[in-house]
Amino acid sequence: MAMVHPDDLGFSRLEPVSHASMHALFLAELGLAPLRITSPTESQGEYHKLYFVKLELKGDSKWSGEEVVLRVARPAFNGIKVRNEVGALHLVRGAGVPAPEVIFWSDTTLNTLGYEYIAMESSPDIERYFNATPYNLHAESHATLNPTGPFSDWTAYISAFLKSYAHIIDIHPSVTHLRPLLPPLNLLIADLDAPLDTSMAWIQKLRQSPSLLPHLWHCDLHLANLLGNANGDILGVIDWEFAAFRASFYRKSSPIRNLIAALPDDPTLSTWPELFLSTLKAKEAALSKDWEAVTNMESVLGKEGLALSSVREQGLEELGYP
């Protein structure tokens, strides 16, 4: 059984190590200086802090110019967790499983960082499935295989994803069976990218829909992040580190469902989301109507938008791109 100190619970939200110490670590281990160190807000775990480290292009090191991952372990399972993960990664890689390669690691806190850590390759999937033999698609990278923003509107966001799909279908030999989809898919992309005044009516509607304008979502809204008083008044909303701009229907569930997730098990809790919405409707009819309108995916997107949001072969046909 692991004993967790309260300070450890928020480890991934802290900055446990300095950029200077990480810079010194990579210089000592690889002779390569980090050019950029970033830490994502949406890709962290409870047991580690994740950093992406872009290394300088220098010499003939395998890792020269590459982006690698540094996983800094929070204090738990001293030594055991890191050794277990390193051993498991070596084992499964030897069996042909596409797992990341370990570059260097430490199962002790007696090091430059003061924490246990593992440095590993960042994107074994791209290296293994695109750059390596038998595919040899050396020009491909994370940037060429994924959509990148910012996007002017929701249809541009969808178009960027479709372009990534079309590119992969076009270049990769393992998905040649999907190539008959390319002509209609490219036609759809061209229509989505057409100037607003010449685009189809349903595309114009999606581009101009107020519900598809960026809405700010907290993305971690629960009772522990609401500050209140004994009267039930909300005095503050905290912990906005996961906040993001998304479409209005990003959260399709009741706004209270996430708030009750951490409460003790109680059979009556299952009725709370519906009770909340019915109470809102009775007390604030206009607000309730607006909420239902902007969070209903079907009403916001319409038939064409729904098909566009998950384009498959059927979706292409529904949109008129057979």
Image: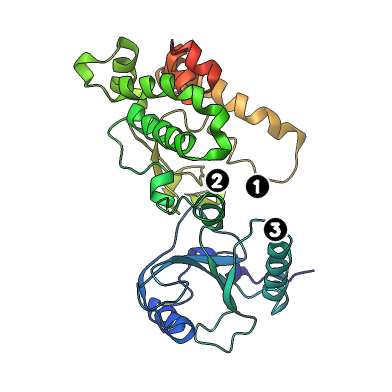
Q: Quadrant of the N terminus?
A: bottom right
Q: Secondary structure at mark 2?
A: loop
What type is the residue that disc 1 sits on? Ala
Q: Residue furthest bottom?
A: 110
Question: Where is 40 relative to 168, above or below?
Answer: below
Q: Secondary structure at mark 1?
A: loop
**Which of the pair 137/225 is nearer the observer?**
137
Residue 43 locus on image (x, y percent): 52, 55
Residue under label 3:
96
Question: Where is 275 relative to 200, above or below?
Answer: below
Neighbourhood count class around disc 2 (C-alpha, 10 Å): few under 14, some 14–19, many 20 upward? some
Confirm or deny contact between disc 1 and disc 3 (CB under 8 A). Answer: no
Residue 144: give its label. Answer: none
Residue under label 1:
262
**Which of the pair 49/3 is nearer the observer?**
49
Lateral position of residue 129 relative to residue 164, left or right: right
Lateral position of residue 158 relative to residue 108, left or right: left
Q: Residue at x 42, y 37 (%)?
A: 167
Residue 222: give its label. Answer: 2
What type is the residue that disc 2 sits on? His
What type is the residue that disc 3 sits on? Gly
Q: Residue at x 51, y 17 (%)?
A: 315
